[in-house]
Image (spheres, helix red, strand yellow):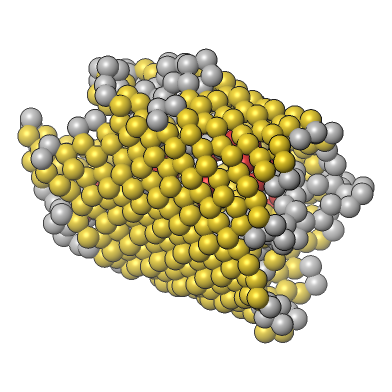
Amino acid sequence: MKAFRLVANSLLVPFSLSPLCTVVAQESSGKTLDPIVVTATLGPKTVGESLASVTVIDEEDIRSKAPADFTDLLRAQPGINVTGNGSFGKTTSVYTRGVKNGGTVFLVDGVKMHSATGGGASWQYFPTELVQRVEVVRGPRSSLYGADAMGGVVQAFTLDPKQGQKGWVEAGAGNFDSQKASAGISGEAGNTRFSLSGLHKESDGTAIVEDGEDKGFRNTAGLGRVVHEFENGGEASAMLLQSEGNSEFEGGDTDFMLRTLGLGVATPLNENWRMGIQFSESRDEATTFQGGSESKFNTRLQQARWENTFSYSVHELVVGAELQQDEVSSTQDFSETSRTNTAVFSQLRLNFGPVDAQLSLRSDDNEAYGTQETGGLALGYKFDRSHRVRASYGTAFRAPTFNDLYFPFTDFGGGFAFSGNPDLKPETSENYELGASGNYQAWFWDLAVYQMDIDSLISLGVVGGVTTSVNVDNARIRGTEFSAGYDSHGWRTAIALSYMDPEDRKTGNQLRRRTRQTARIDLDKTVSNFVFGGSVIAEGDRYDDAANTNRLPGFATLDLRAGWNFAPDWSTRLTLANVLDKEYSTARRSATQNYIAAGRTGMLTVRYDFR
């Protein structure tokens, strides 16, 4: 969250973002704190040098907040809207700068996670407890990451062993009969280091609709990492993460499984050329039991990426190629069950004293929807070591899903039948942004204004009496984002304010489920062995339908937390979410029934770290 704080431990940069390397924090007297990030560009750059709108959520933030769901970290961050069908592992969507869930790319250590049938990531099943750091990049990034990076990119970095740490165990319990336990070990032998960690949590949950029954959630997850450093500065790495369990909803339940595997090698070939290659696979599998029937939607994304970075003085050129294949296995008889995408890409990063320039180009050729070219141009000017302005232009696209293209004709009864449309085109966008920032030793601020014009929006329409996906609407999304933070003398403070105008250009209505205003304030204070903190999150009203007739009112919530390091290597934390027991909704189940979030929620944990 605090985009001024450097990571003080070694961070493995996944090859899919840049060659494998180690980024070490630098905190020297008199220097401006400007964290190194890797998601905004195809290589490690400070937030200022990235010429993008970036939010960093570091390990201290994650540990102190101990959120129940991963998206609780993202909620009301600049430009971010989160909606959900209730709490505790229920279906959740992330809207970045007003772009629907499928328009935000989610990476885990550089590996893309998404459902090829539904589009977007299954955020609700991803285990926060195995995450060390999160980077949120807002604005188009299709010229770097291809399809779906229209609103932005969220990347989670999993736990990496720290020097001197051998492992930990943690256990906790809370209301709604919630329990969780996690443990991890790490070690090193010569130039090789490894870590293994695991998690189990479950809850009876709470009602997700008014007068409904409690709907539970169960999750078991594991993570393994191995990294070997070569004498020439290169690295080889392997990472495997799996999360599986069960989530109940109104009328049924879902067995789920997420898995991501990444294998990468990167090495310098000479002082000006670094090359690497990565192979990865991600799976999103769900089996749903409802009304006495079973439905299965399993998707797999396999990817190979080759990347070369050439440097000349302070300038860099990245060129590479990518091959990926989506596969679907389902109880539904899709007319096509796989599609292949090939891409070539490049990025030029230039520095001329106070002036930075970046140019990126990419071409994707997909056998399902054809060829798409995207590009980006960003310019920055640094007035002094603390103040910088930036301007950027970029194009992006969002791919139609397998459901959009190939879902078989199905009569659901009640006069409603649905079928896919193989003639769909991708959504495309043009984006403009102006920004200014100040980074100092103890605090930062950042301001951005943007406009996004989206063509060929994919929405539902009726053709020949059958509901199908069609390219009909255009949208214009304008917005302003402001963030600021302070970190000194035991105080950690962050403020995020956003205003957005997400307009359907055909009707003039507000786009469905997007709110115009969000605000978030996080405040923590460390006193000796204690830390106390709280968060206030406020969101404006939104509409659950395109016609803007089903209004969901705005709300504000208060979270409180406290931690105590009561003995060497021992700590305990208490978190209270929605302290005022506010009932609120961000989505509707039907025209007359809202999904409701959990009320007051508490969790107490105890942790021991092995040294």
Q: Residue at x 61, y 50 (%)?
A: 133
Q: Is residue 299 above or below residue 457?
A: below
x and y percentages locating residue 92 in the rendered image: 39, 37
Q: Is residue 30 above or below residue 330?
A: above
The quadrant holding residue 529 is top right
x and y percentages locating residue 410 in the rendered image: 10, 45
Q: Is residue 368 above or below residue 175?
A: below
Q: Residue at x 30, y 54 (%)?
A: 285
Q: Is residue 413 visible?
A: yes
Compared across the picture, whether 182 is left or right of 349 comes to: left
Report the label total: 0
Compared across the picture, whether 535 is left or right of 408 comes to: right
x and y percentages locating residue 392 in the rendered image: 64, 48
The quadrant holding residue 11 is bottom right
Q: Is residue 373 visible?
A: no
Compared across the picture, whether 94 is left or right of 588 comes to: right
Q: Residue at x 16, y 60 (%)?
A: 335
